[in-house]
Image (tube, coloured by chain):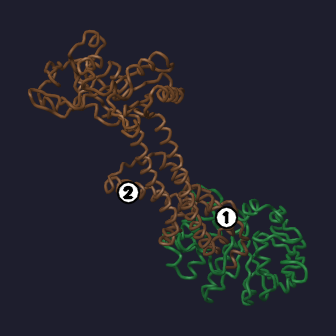
Amino acid sequence: MSLIQLQGISRVYGSGKTAVHALRSADLRIEKGTFVAIYGASGSGKSTMLNMLGLLDEPTAGSYWLEGRNVANLSDKERSYIRCRKVGIIFQSFNLFPHFSILENVCMPMRFAGLERKEMLARAAELLDRLGLGSRLKHSPSQLSGGQCQRVAIARALANNPAVILGDEPTGNLDEKTGDEMIGIFHELVAEGRTVVMVTHNAEYEKEVQRVIELHDGTVVRQ
Amino acid sequence: MSLMYNLESTWLSLKHHAFRSLLAMLGVVLGVAAVVGMLAVSEGAKRESINRIQQQGVDNIILHSEKPRINESGGEAIFFYGISKNDIAHFNSVFENVKTVVPIVEIRHKSIYVNGRPSDVILAGTTPEFLTVSRSQNADPRGRWLVDTDCILSEMVCSVGVDAARQLFGLEDPLGKTVSVGGTTFKVVGLLKNPLRSKLAGKNDINNMVFVDYETLLSIFNRDFMAVEANYVYVQVENLDYLKNTAGRIRTYLSEVHELPDYTISVPYELLLAEQATQRVFTIVMGSIAAISLLVGGIGIMNIMLANIYERTKEIGTLRALGAPKQTILVQFLFEAVTLTALGGLIGVGIGFLIAVLIKHAAAMPTIVTPGSVIVALTVSILTGIIFGTHPAWKAASLSPIEALRR
């Protein structure tokens, strides 16, 4: 059984003549422990695909099986529950909470999962330490460089020990060298048995990943 | 979601927008301050007037003898007027619901002499029931108040009010001393004290008077000196429920028996009811002002919450992406709104309290901040937060995560 299986997933925004078909009946399987890049030009539907995988958006049609369970068309509460525990999301612009310390930032998903405060702080510190930020736990995001911020975001994505890490252009705001570091971290995560799905429009990363899914105009053209 | 998280995120948001939050709160602050301050003033005025009325005894009907004006009598000179002994006998024997009838007659144009020195203390004659009807006490355990045998034996004794005693005798012990009025001497057998510092029919301070037996006084200073048989009559009723009825019957009786309007009737209980009715109107007016100011305050809160949400859309999207359900967002922003109004309410209560103290000292008006008004003010501010915070919070919670993240 695949970790992720999409069957005939489509997403239409609007209706009638102005309807936009962001995804057209996409079928996709992603196995556990693979590093996947979703590649495509802008407007190709790769962000919509990532939103689907992250349960941020609901498909117009089709089914989405995550760890053997159909998670398409669940209630908001159930989708939030799964998003919190099964999926870790990393954004292009980091999306850290500027008024909280990086330790608190990493704690955030664990709060939603209802962890004990002590447990939460210990795990957050451990994750940040692992990503080389162990000495800066009390710093606020504005005191850190872009690369460091993205490490915090990765730690935050890992907080609830999710099955899938989703990256929305995670290297887009970083210089080449820092971007490569991030890819290195993703490789480590994959080696641990995690699944990493990364949206990118940078063809250079094709060589780095195990699998490339290419989208064009809402259709999967290569997988 | 934990309370801790909500407290923390609210604190950070308030800290980040300290000035803006303060401005938003201002409406609630001023509204609550005005309400608390004004209620304190009204409460003070109410207590004072109720006190004044209660001093006269709520279960009393008070009759005053009034000298009719010449034109009312058709130019005829008037020598005798007012409530008569016949009237008093009638009240006692005919009316139900009458517990006691206490006449008071004052000697007005004769000074009380002590050791040959005159004073302006007033001598009055009354019956033993006066003590209870006027809510007075026998102040000195060695002495006594007037008793029925004083009347039967025509004892030349008196009881002196505590303030009158100080004026007449200074630091000396008044018991056993004598006072003289118009050549008649009375022996002081007791001291009288009125703890409410009541004024007799609202005029003379009971503590500053000298009392002798009613019949005795009337027989000594007969009609040669006195135009009235009673300056005041206190009619104490058995049952307050029928007080109005009894007062009505007294009115009817007096209007039939007295040709001229040589009396007035005051019913402290009716004054009390009228006072309470006035208070109700005042409370309604206050309530309306409070409602309007809190409405304005609430709109201010709603405004800033909408601005906050607009500004923090991306943050809301991120929270949702990290697994926060709608409910968490809803509670977070509602909590923030309620914190703003509750804080505004607290500051408002503080300022209202200061206003009350200021008015008390600057305007010399009694003000009382009741716990009730504080509780109401705080409850209403919290309710304002809930009412005006719900729409923005709901709006925040209803944002689609992808829409929110796109910002």
Question: Same subunit under labels 2 and 1?
Answer: yes
Crowdedness near tag 1: few (<14), some (14–19) or many (≥20) residues, C-alpha within 10 Å: some
Crowdedness near tag 2: few (<14), some (14–19) or many (≥20) residues, C-alpha within 10 Å: some
Q: In this view, does A205 lie above or below B395?
A: below
Q: Can residue B207 be seen in the rendering of this structure?
A: yes
Q: Is residue B351 above or below residue A30?
A: above
Quarter of the image that includes the N terminus of chain B? bottom right
Q: What is the distance, in whole Å, between disc 2 and disc 1 at their CAs?
A: 34 Å
Q: Is residue B189 left or right of residue B265?
A: left
Q: Position of residue B297 (x, y in %)?
A: 55, 64
Q: Where is residue B379 in the image (x, y as percent from the top left)?
A: 55, 51
Residue at (47%, 72%) from the top-left corner? B19
Q: Is residue B165 above or below residue B42?
A: above
State the residue position of label 1. B391
Q: Residue furthest left?
A: B116
Q: Determine the colour of chain A.
A: green
The chain containing the residue under callout 1 comes to B
Residue at (70%, 82%) from the top-left corner? A169
Towards the viewer: B178 or B104: B104
Q: Are marks 2 and 1 in contact (CB under 8 Å)?
A: no
Q: Earlier in the sequence, mark 2 or mark 1?
A: 2
Q: Can residue A121 be seen in the rendering of this structure?
A: no
The chain containing the residue under callout 2 comes to B
Towards the viewer: B221 or B134: B221
- Chain represented in brown: B
State the residue position of label 2. B354
Towards the viewer: B185 or A6: B185
Query: Which numbered circle lies on residue B275?
Result: none
Say which amino acid is labelled 2.
Answer: Leu
Say which amino acid is labelled 1.
Answer: His
